[in-house]
Amino acid sequence: MNKLLGRAAELLQRRKETKYKQVILVRDDLKLPKGKLAAQVAHASVETVMKADQGVVQKWRAEGMMKIVLKVKDEKELLNLHHQADYHGLTSALITDAGHTVVEPGTITVCGIGPALVSRIDEVTGHLQLL
Amino acid sequence: MNKLLGRAAELLQRRKETKYKQVILVRDDLKLPKGKLAAQVAHASVETVMKADQGVVQKWRAEGMMKIVLKVKDEKELLNLHHQADYHGLTSALITDAGHTVVEPGTITVCGIGPALVSRIDEVTGHLQLL
């Protein structure tokens, strides 16, 4: 718990110095094993980077590519936030797992949003907690 | 354990149908919390994608962007494999964490390799286990 608070403080500090970020939303209900989870998060990160405005991507990269992994309760909340991101004009990508072992094929696991201005992303995901 | 064997079988099956992959090597000794770990893996994934041959990146993306997260024992093994990847002409990127809470600032956490042909990556990392 102390570690989580420390990470939150670190992120708050970095947020003040950072203009751009990317967030990746993870379904907490799936309880993915950490290797699988990391691969899905990376999938979402790369996919949204490829879809995003490349000028913004370069600015974000120059700043250190801030990425924040946040948790959502379930598929319903994930889809809702994906639609909200679209509505706010933010690049986002839902990732569906093709695997057959850890989760059912076709399970929507994570959603990447951005990179975009921190303030614009916070309008949609500012209320979520760190994974 | 059954889940891990299942995942290994799934990956073996996909490997037969897949020409390109990316691997991300994770230091098992750091025991990073899952959110931090996922962000570091995503960092390595994006960084190597940006450094890699973009023609290969497009082929890899068209195939479904196979990403495998593997574990290494410690920093020494990570650095050794990074150098071996370089020696074999594979794009790779070491990621250093700038944080101040979970690990010491400047700690090398993960290493991305590829995307590249599966056979070329396996020459360097084929002996490693899934995280």
Image (cartoon, coloured by chain):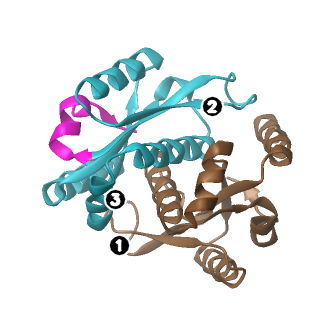
Chain colours: A cyan, B brown
The amino acid beneath tag 2 is Asp
| Number of on-image labels | 3
Marks 1 and 3: CB-CB under 8 Å? Answer: no
Q: Is residue A1 visible?
A: no
Q: Please state the horizontal and vertical placement of residue B54, each as a whole percent of the image.
A: 55, 62
* The N terminus of chain B: image quadrant: top right
Determine the secondary structure under disc 2.
strand
Q: Measured from the top left, where is residue B118 in percent x and y?
A: 77, 59
Name the residue tied to disc 1.
Answer: B105
Residue position marked by numbered label 3 in the rendering: A65
Amino acid found under the numbered disc labelled 3: Met
Q: CA distance from mark 1 to mark 3?
A: 16 Å
Question: Residue visible at 34% across and 21% down?
Answer: A83
Real-space Cα distance between discs 1 and 2? 34 Å
Q: What residue is shown at x 58% (from left), y 76% (from top)?
A: B75
Q: Residues within 10 Å of mark 1 (few under 14, many from 20)?
A: few
Residue corresponding to mark 2: A97
The residue at 44%/52% (across/down) is B39
Measured from the top left, where is residue B102 in percent x and y?
39, 60
